[in-house]
Image (tube, helix red, strand yellow):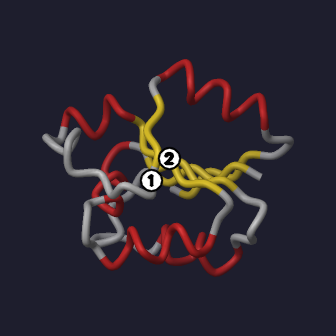
Amino acid sequence: MLHTINKSPYADASLDECLRVCDGDDVILLIEDAVYAALTGSVWSARLTTSAKAVYVLRPDAAARGMANRIAANIGTVDYVGFVQLCCDNLAIQSWY
């Protein structure tokens, strides 16, 4: 399953709720303000990679927030084409808004 989160974990509980139900085969994509969870050294970046098979950040959203070079090494980045590919690769998509 692909989980997409768009709210900052510092302002909303969506990411925390997602991590509670996420299993080791799930993929997480952070978009919009959720990209703040992927900052190098943040408590969230460590939690993310222990909860899912793979974690990605939407690169244009990270760049728009000045974070393009501040994403934790264990979190991947994708562009819009990669976003669509993640949607195609997963049978189900859960959006956390």
Residue type (three-letter) at the residue carrying disc 2:
Tyr
Which one is nearer the viewer's eye here, 93 or 90? Answer: 90
Label drawn at residue 44: none
The x, y position of residue 85, in whole percent, is 67, 26
Classify residue 56 as left or right of residue 26. Answer: left
Residue type (three-letter) at the residue carrying disc 1:
Ile
Labels 2 and 1 touching (C-beta < 8 A): yes
The x, y position of residue 88, in whole percent, is 77, 28
Residue 11 to residue 29: above or below: below
Circle 2 packing at 10 Å, graded few (<14), some (14-19), many (20+), is: many
Label 2 belongs to which residue? 56
- The image quarter containing residue 40 is bottom left
Q: Residue at x 50, y 77 (%)?
A: 16
Classify residue 97 as left or right of residue 41. Answer: right
The x, y position of residue 80, in whole percent, is 49, 22
Residue 89 to residue 36: above or below: above
Classify residue 13 as left or right of residue 83. Answer: left
Which one is nearer the viewer's eye here, 36 or 70? Answer: 70
Which one is nearer the viewer's eye here, 54 or 29? Answer: 54
Structural distance between the alpha carbons of marks 2 and 1? 6 Å
Q: Between tags 2 and 1, which lies in front? A: 1
Query: Which residue of the protein is positioned furthest toward the right in this rendering?
Result: 91
Label 1 belongs to which residue? 75
Circle 1 packing at 10 Å, graded few (<14), some (14-19), many (20+), is: many
Query: Which of disc 1 and disc 2 is earlier in sequence?
Result: 2
The x, y position of residue 4, in whole percent, is 57, 49
Badge 1 marks a residue whose secondary structure is: loop
Badge 2 marks a residue whose secondary structure is: strand
Query: Which residue of the protein is positioned furthest toward the top in this rendering?
Result: 81
Query: Which residue of the protein is positioned furthest toward the front in this rendering?
Result: 73
Which one is nearer the viewer's eye here, 92 or 47? Answer: 47
